[in-house]
Image: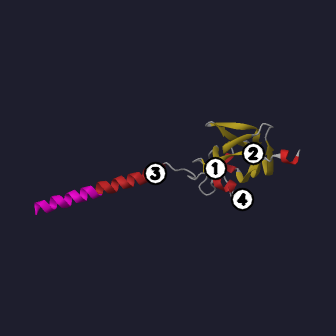
Amino acid sequence: MKKNRRVLKAIAVFSFVSLMKVSCLFAQEIETIWGDSLKSGVRESTDNDVNSPGRNAFDGNTETYWTISSGKTNGFAERYFEEEIDIEGVTADLYLPGETSVTVFWEKDGTLIPYENGIIKGEIEGHVELRFAERIRKSKRFVFKLDGDNASQAKIYEINLLERTDCRQYKK
């Protein structure tokens, strides 16, 4: 009888320890994921509003928008790709109150660099097109930082990257 109790106790302890290990592994895996874990997609800051996440700015739908949580003064949304793309500008449909801006960054060797001419300052509402300086840069990552005292009131409806076209094929 004592032997059976020891065996049952050992099985129970082993089962409990195994269950805890599996649970912890699962919890650790979830904690390391923020945003997309795909080869291309959207990542975003934790200050973004849960109901209006950064991915809304890239979904092709101007009925949805990206905003940050109430009371926050900055946040970001990042568009990333598996392969480098060459962009010459950005278009955005947005509302930015005064004292608010969106800055566009590109990544090179792990460092985020702001584009020259890559800032939109509020107060503004509507469609904006930014064209970057002649030196076009290829990158896999493009970060859009929303910043300012009134940033939580801003609404970014849509952001589109303008890929560079090679006019040499048309002899222009």
Earlier along the polypeptide chain: callout 3 or callout 2? 3
Name the spot of residue 49 as percent of width and height, x first.
61, 53
Is residue 2 rendered magenta in the image? yes
Give me the C-alpha separation between circle 3 and circle 4: 30 Å
Q: For numbered disc 2, what is the local secondary structure?
A: strand
Q: Is residue 97 visible?
A: yes
Three-letter amino acid code of the residue under disc 2: Ile
**Disc 3 marks which residue?**
29
Give me the C-alpha separation between circle 2 and circle 4: 18 Å
Name the spot of residue 25 as percent of width and height, x first.
40, 52
Q: For numbered disc 1, what is the local secondary structure?
A: loop
Three-letter amino acid code of the residue under disc 3: Glu
Earlier along the polypeptide chain: callout 1 or callout 4? 4
Q: For numbered disc 4, what is the local secondary structure?
A: loop
| Quadrant in which residue 63 is drawn | bottom right
User: Badge 4 local density, few (<14 within 10 Å), some, or many (20+)?
Assistant: few
Q: Quadrant of the C terminus?
A: top right
**Would you place residue 119 above or below residue 61 in this image?**
above
Residue 68, numbered label: 1
Q: Over which residues does the magenta segment extend?
A: 1-15
**Disc 2 marks which residue?**
87
**Disc 4 marks which residue?**
60
